[in-house]
Image (cartoon, helix red, strand yellow):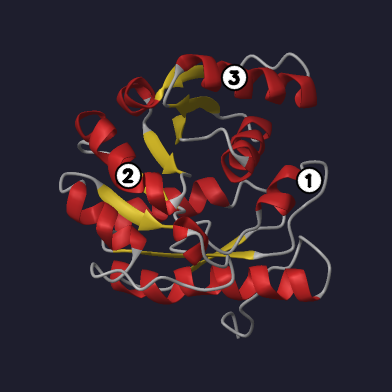
Amino acid sequence: MKIAIIGGTGGQGLGIAIRFIQAGEDVIIGSRTIEKAQTAVDKVKDLLGDVKNVKAAENADAAEEGDLLVLTVPLAAQKSTLISIKEGAKGKTLLDATGPLESAIGGSPIDYIDLWEGAAAERSAKILKDTQVICAFNNVSSAALMNFEEPIDCDCLISGDNADSKAIATELIEKIPGVKVVDCGPLKRAKIIEKITPLLIGLNIRNKTQFGGIRITGLDK
């Protein structure tokens, strides 16, 4: 499976890319420009060695080539990025990690922006009508992802309206050591999942760490 990380040059996108590369998946790191994407690929190779299962592409080309897409852009860039990949994303599954944080409009990263669509992932679904959108990775910190020599002590909460897409996402995400996926139900639950992001950021700041995560317990009893 080819995994296209759309807007994958930041800490979260790079971390997800690295984890999937380590799991043996073919990864395409996308960006607005091929130069920026190639810089990210070079950084990955500096960290992991001369791995062969990663390449650079512009976002639209990455979406066209990828079998499954992961969106890791700031809220301010979400809509324009989605429009740019709309054709390539048709008929595919997209994991949306967008966090609706006030930092997108110059505010605090520990405060949430209420979107009229309900959630950032629901906004994605409205724009990409022919794509199965799954809310995912909102509660997994970029620092934990980038700490790629260690397992991640965190569940990944997901939501979406297509059972097959959620099953594909679950199998892929759980290739990351330590991570267990918790299916939280339909996509409308994304507005709850996304609000955990500023909560965790605030807890990390308060406790002077970057690795705070969340576990859901008792579900297997």
Q: Nearer the viewer, mark 1 or mark 3?
A: 1
The residue wearing badge 1 is: 147
Position in image of residue 1 (x %, y %): 45, 29
- Near-viewer residue (156 or 174): 156
Taking the spot 46% from the left edge, 27% from the top edge, the residue there is 30
Rendered location of residue 94, percent (x, y) = 35, 45
Numbered badge on residue 93? 2
Instruction: Classify residue 20 by image quadrant.
Output: top right
Dot 3 corresponds to which residue? 53
Image position, residue 151 (x, y; %): 77, 52
Question: What amino acid type should be assigned to the residue bearing mark 1?
Answer: Asn
Q: Is 90 or 83 nearer to us in this picture?
A: 83
Q: How many marks?
A: 3
Q: CA distance from mark 1 to mark 2?
A: 26 Å
Name the element at disc 2. strand
Compute the Cα span from label 3 to label 2. Answer: 20 Å
Q: Amino acid at mark 2?
A: Thr
Q: Residue at x 60, y 45 (%)?
A: 12
**Label 3 vs 2, first from the N-terminus:** 3
